Amino acid sequence: MNTQPSVIEAAHPVPAEEPTPLRESPARFMNRELSWLQFNRRVMEEASNRNHPLLEQLRFLSISAANLDEFFMVRVSGLREQLKAGVVTPSQDGLTPAAQLAELGKAVAALTGDQQARWVELKRDLHENRIHLLGPGDIGPAERVWLEDYFLN
């Protein structure tokens, strides 16, 4: 059997299937939810920046946690509603709601693990600097009345 291409095949080779150009590929888009988590990670990382005062580090960590709460209330709940409704249409980046939730789960697990680790470090650093955070059980009735009056007025 002759495996040599014919003269016609050699003159006009059949083009191999070319990859989709980037301008037509979903890969040209970043997933908006994953991008938002990357932004929130950068906020959280400011909590580890030792050039910031200690209470600013705590503030960055708190902002990151509050942002993540809102992210779940708005964006993740929206994706879950799409999943519940049976939406399988991919977003512009090519990910279906189910695929987005799976990717978000991995990214959120890493982010929250880092947040918790930083919180443990910050509590230690705050304590070493004689800054004590009190919980509701640490506040007596007189302090509670004073705090309520202070914040309401």
Image (spheres, rainbow, N blue to C red):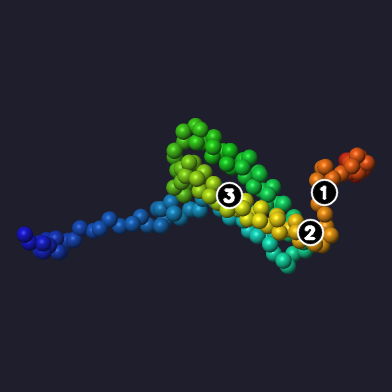
Residue at 48% in and 41% down: 98
Q: In which quarter of the image is the C terminus?
A: top right
Q: Position of 4 compared to 17: left or right?
A: left
Image location (x, y in percent) of residue 141: 91, 39
Q: Callout 2: helix, strand or loop?
A: helix
Q: What residue type is labelled 3?
A: Val
Residue under the point 63% across and 55% down: 114
Could you tell me the amino acid type at mark 1?
Answer: Leu
> Label 2: few (<14), some or many (≥20) within 10 Å?
some
Q: Earlier in the sequence, mark 3 or mark 2?
A: 3
Asked whether disc 3 touches disc 2, contact meaning CB atoms under 8 Å apart, the reply is: no
Circles 1 and 2: CB atoms closer than 8 Å: no
Please, what secondary structure does the residue beneath circle 3 have?
helix
Residue farthest to the bottom?
51
Give the Cα separation between the discs numbered 3 and 2. Answer: 26 Å
| Residue labelled with disc 1 | 134
Percent coordinates x, y for residue 150 in the rendering: 90, 44
Q: Can residue 56 be seen in this view?
A: no
Say which residue label 3 marks: 108
Of helix, strand and loop, which one carries label 1? loop
Between label 3 and label 2, give the one nearer the viewer: 2
Quarter of the figure with residue 72: top right
The mark nearer the N terminus, 1 or 2, is: 2
The residue depicted at 48 percent of the width and 53 percent of the height is 29
Q: Name the residue under label 2.
A: 126
